[in-house]
Each structure stands twice: as structure tokens, then as C-alpha cells.
Amino acid sequence: MDEIASRRLPRLRRLLFVLALLPPLTAHAQAARTESAQEPSRSIDVGGQLDVTTRYVWRGIDYGGGGFPYATVYATAYHMTFTLGYFSSFSGSSGRGGRDGLDLTLSYKWDLGPWAIEPSLYYYHYLTAATSPPSGEVATKVSWRAGGVTLYTDQICDAYNFAGAYFGDIGATYSRSLSPRLSWKTTVWLGWANATFNEANIGVARTALNTLGLEASLTWNLTNAIYVRPHASYNYTIDPRLQEHTRTHVFNAGLAVGFAF
């Protein structure tokens, strides 16, 4: 009996964790319904993007090169956004384990003046990697903006197959409009993770300061609805033990083409 109970306990913790997230999401949804009853109906914003990069990099972890296309479509209404993404690899394998698959995201953005709070649910389903089971995460992003500068932090916890795996980051973004159709954005961020996350994704059961990242992009709005965005990033793996199992210096570049209306 003790052995059966020990196997059921992680599942019970996982269920309680997900249930604990439902009240705030429900409250946000109720607020949106109340708001809709008081204001005129709003249109749904939709858009999509195709981003092709030289490498597959996720949370600062390099999963291989050979060209990596990532296509997304989204719909936004009443501060809630649903996103469907498909990721693949031109080479037929995206490195560690193969990561071709789908991801789903449901998020709600709550604006409070210069502050913003954004709880999210993520689900990942891998199509070609037998050793990579589906996973789901709950996350919260908190940001504060002043002029062209935004400070933010993400707190992310797996609630499905790798329950208890945690990743967090803190960063700063600077955005500037160069012309009516051209804008520049730069981000620097620092990420850390617990032993469960690093064991599942890197193969080292070690809590560590994982990654220092730098990103830059230039967005050119061809029309009011279509844009082109070249971008580049650099990630440095900080922890010496993690460096033994993943790339220390990761350079990545890409070109995104998208639409929104």
C-alpha cells in the first residue's frame, strides 16, 4: 500500500497544482465577460508568423542546427490570446532527441498602468521524438515599462510529465521607433532552473544559473498588416557543469515574416 501511495502522490500534487491555477484564470474570464456586457463588442485580432532560424534554441538550450522553421497563428480578444505553433527542422532532426511538433498557448494579459501581469498555459506535443513525451507548463510573466524600457520576469513550472521542473528569468527590453515603418528592439536576460528542469532538458540534475542571453531585432512594416523582422541572438551557458552537456556559446539568426489584422 505504501508503494502504491508513493506512486500516486506525484500525480496528486500535479493535479492540485493545476487546480490552484484555475481560480485566477476563471476570475479573469469572468472580468472579461462583465466588461463585454458594459462595452460595445470588440473585434478579434488575428495574425500569424513564419520564423526561420539557423538553430533551434529554447530557454537558452541549443538543440541543433540545419535550419529551423517555426510557424504560428494566434487570435486575441478581451485580453486573452490563443496561439497554435508548429516547429520542425529542415535537416529532419533538430538535434537532441528531435523536436518536431506542436505547441499550444493560452494567455491572459492584465494591464495595470505601467505594470502588466500575464498568466499562461503551455502544452507541447512532439511528433518525431519517441523519447520526448508531451509536456505542459503553467507560467506567469510580470513586467513594468517606462518609455522604451521594459523590465520583466517569467516564472514557469511544468505541471504535466515533468511536474516540478522550474525555469525562471529576469530581463530588460529596449524598444525604439526609427521611422514610421521601422523599429528596433534589444533584450538582455538571465535565466536559471532547478535540478528537475536541467535533468529533463540537459541531462544534469543540478540547480543552476543557466543562461545569459542577448537578442536584437529590426522590424520593417511593409504595410499596416505585413511585416518583416530579421533578428539575431547570443546565449552563454554560465554553469560549468551544464557546459559539459550543452553548447557554451550559441549564436542564432533568423528572419520572420508575419501578418496581423
Image (cartoon, rainbow, N blue to C red):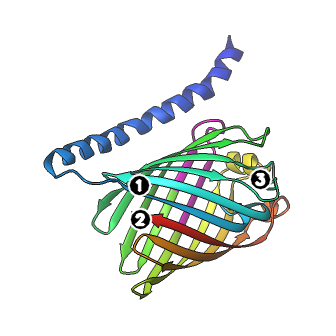
Name the residue carrying label 3.
Answer: 202
Q: Residue at x 37, y 42 (%)?
A: 25
Q: Which residues are magenta?
A: 155-170
Confirm whether the magenta stretch covers residue 159: yes
Instruction: Tell me the distance, in whole angstroms, between the alpha carbons under discs 1 and 3.
Output: 27 Å
The amino acid type, in three-letter code, at marker 2 is Ser
Percent coordinates x, y for residue 237 in the rendering: 74, 67
The disc label shown at residue 84, or none:
none
The amino acid type, in three-letter code, at marker 3 is Ile
Query: Furthest-right residue in view?
Result: 244
The amino acid type, in three-letter code, at marker 1 is Glu
The disc label shown at residue 143, or none:
2
Secondary structure of residue under mark 2: strand
Percent coordinates x, y for residue 189 in the rendering: 58, 70
Name the residue carrying label 1.
Answer: 118
Q: Are marks 2 and 1 in contact (CB under 8 Å)?
A: yes
Q: Residue at x 65, y 71 (%)?
A: 212
Q: Earlier in the sequence, mark 2 or mark 1?
A: 1
Q: Residue at x 72, y 51 (%)?
A: 198
